[in-house]
Image: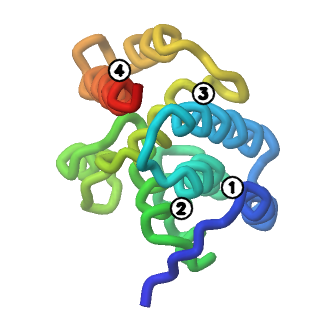
Amino acid sequence: MKAHRIPTKEECLAILRKHNTPSQVINHCLIVAKIAERLCAQIEDINIALVIAASMLHDIGRSKEHSIFHAIEGVKILESENLDQRLILSVKKHIGTGITETEAAKLGLPPDDYIPRTAEEIIVSYSDNIACGSRECSFDEALNNFISKFGEDSHVVRGFFRQKEFIEKIIMKNI
C-alpha cells in the first residue's frame, strides 16, 4: 500500500535538515512555500497541505545534485521517507515549466513525462519559477530570465505563460 503522509511545514524543515540540504536551498524552499500559500489562499478546492509540503521539499534533491537531476534525487529521498505519492510527483514535475518524455530523453532523464498537470503540481512549479533564489520576483523578471536562458520561442517560456494563465483562471473562478 502507498503511503499517504503529507508532512507539516515543520516536519518538512526537519526532513530537509536530515538530508543535509544546504541552508540557501532551505531559504529558497521557504520562499516558494510562502508564494504557493498566498496563491492557495485565493483558490477553493485545493489541497493546501500538499502544496505547502511539495513547495517545502521540491528541491530536497539539491542536497545531492544541483543539475536538473535534482528532481530525480528528490524523488528517491522522498520515497525513502514514505511520503504521499502526490507530493513525490509534484517534486518530480517541478523542474522548469515541465518536460515532455521526448525532452527528458534528450536531457538524459529517466524516460517519463515531467509536465505538471494537477493544480497542486502547477502551483508548486509556478511558485518555484517566480522565486529568484531566496526572494520573490515578478512574473516579468522570471520571464526575462527564461527568455535569456532558453529563447523567446522555447517550450519553457510557453509553459511559463500556460502556468500563469492556468493559475489566474482558477483564481478568477473563485472571485
Residue at image mark 1: 63
Q: Residues within 10 Å of mark 1 (few under 14, many from 20)?
A: many
- The residue that appears at 33% across and 53% down in the rendered structure is 108
Quarter of the figure with the N terminus = bottom left
Q: Disc 3 or disc 2, which is closer to the eye?
A: 3
3 or 4: tag closer to the N-terminus: 3
Q: Secondary structure at mark 1?
A: helix
- The residues bearing labels 2 and 1 have C-alpha atoms spaced at a distance of 9 Å
Side (left or right) of 120 relative to 56: left
Q: Position of residue 173 (x, y in %)?
A: 33, 30
Instruction: Determine whether 150 is above or below 141 in the image.
Output: below
Work out whether residue 103 or residue 32 is closer to the camera in this orientation and state it: 32
Q: Which mark is residue 131?
A: 3
Amino acid type, callout 1? Ser
Q: Secondary structure at mark 4?
A: helix
Amino acid type, callout 4? Phe
Residue at image mark 2: 73
